[in-house]
Every structure is written in C-alpha cells, then in structure tokens.
Amino acid sequence: MGLELKYDDGQTPLDEEEKEGIKIKSITTQEELDEFEQLNIEKAVEWTIHSKLTPEKILTEKFIKDLHKRMYGDVWKWAGEFRTTEKNIGIPWTKIGLELKNLLDDTKYWIEHKTFSAEEIAIRFKHRIVSIHCFPNGNGRHSRMMADIIMESIFGNEIFSWHQSNMVKANETRKVYINALREADNGNVAPLIKFAKN
C-alpha cells in the first residue's frame, strides 16, 4: 500500500517518483504526512530562532534550499532540491535557478532603495517565490516562513500571524489565502498583506 494523498485547491500533486522519496515508510495517509511534516517544520522554526541570519545569508539560493531541507528533510529525500518536473502551478522547472536569482536581486534592490514597506517587500518575495514553485512540494509553507524570516531578520519586525494557521487543511482560511494569492497574481498584493497580518 503506497502513499495516498489528497489535494486541495492550490496544492501541487506529487508524481509517483516524488512520492517514492518519502523517508518514513509507515506514512500512508495525508493526515500522517501532515503531522510528520509539521514536526519537521517546528524543528526548522527552532533553527531559525537560534541562528544569526543576515540579509547576505538569507537572500541566496543556498539559504532557500537549506531552509526547505530543514523544513522537510526528515520526511522527504528530495527536500532542499529544486524540482525537475512540471507542475500544475509554477514556471517551467528549467528556469527555476534563473527566476530565483532575478527575485533575489530584485529583493536586494527593494531593500536597499526602500522601494516598498518592509511588509510589502516580504509579501512580494513570498508571492514571487511561490509562483516560481522551486520544490516538488511544501512551497506555500516555505514561502510563508521566508516572509517571516525577512520580516524578523532583515527588518527587525514581528513575524506575520498568517491567521495562526498552517493552511494545510481546506477551510475558509485557506480559501481566503488562495484568493489573496490570485489577487497578487494580478498585481494586487494588498489582500495578501492583509491576510498575512491577521
């Protein structure tokens, strides 16, 4: 019996090869997977709290990959590695490295020139990195943690509350979040900023 996963609106299905990357073979249901991933993510949060993170360190491809590996490395063999397959969302996988470099360069520019407020820079980064969809899975949670790290470690501000939700389950909160992402796709980041702060 393999891993049976259910996907909600806005989630990226894994292909069979990616599913084989599961490290804990006793996981067979979505609920078990969510639980193990959440435990792993909590360890990653702990790590960010105890690390000295500077803008020079954070805004690099290495850090983006390392954070994903810390968030999912106990559960998935491919954690921290860019995807090599096409997905229902995201850019063609062959362009991930280039698009991520553009995003990192843009973000450094926004910070240096104070192009936007701190929260708008963090949310624009979050939106763009989730649109690139660097990894086979976990992109939403990874992008939210990146936004929090930017708020806290680069700007010295409080992290976002994200409605106190990990947004894994389909509910009203997730629906509002997905709608805010779609608004951001159309160039309006205000609803996503509002969502992040509530």
Image (tube, grey):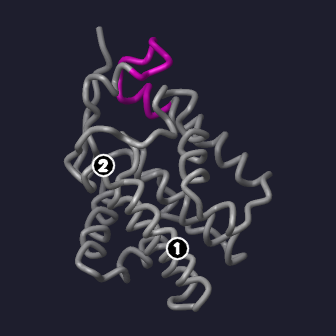
Left or right of 55 on screen, residue 32: left
Q: Earlier in the sequence, mark 1 or mark 2?
A: 2
Q: Is residue 33 magenta?
A: yes
Q: What x and y, as percent, mark residue 139?
A: 41, 50
Q: From this viewpoint, which residue is outermost toward the left?
A: 88
Query: In terms of depth relative to the viewer, which is nearer, 67 or 94?
Result: 94
Q: What x and y, as percent, mark residue 24?
A: 49, 17
In this rendering, the answer to whether 115 lies above or below 181 is: below
Q: Residues within 10 Å of mark 2 (few under 14, many from 20)?
A: few
- Quadrant where the image shows the N terminus: top left
Determine which quarter of the picture holds residue 124.
Answer: bottom left
Q: Main secondary structure of the magenta part?
A: loop
> In the rendering, which numbered label is found on residue 94?
2
Amino acid residing under circle 1: Ala
Amino acid residing under circle 2: Thr
Q: What x and y, as percent, mark residue 52?
A: 79, 59
Residue at the spot x=32%, y=61% of the render?
A: 131
In this rendering, the answer to whether 184 lies above or below 90 is: below
Name the residue that disc number 1 marks.
122
Left or right of 7 on screen, residue 38: right
Secondary structure of residue under mark 2: helix
Q: Can residue 24 be seen in this view?
A: yes
Query: In terms of depth relative to the viewer, which is nearer, 29 or 96?
Result: 96
Left or right of 189 on screen, residue 65: right
Q: What x and y, as percent, mark residue 130?
A: 38, 59
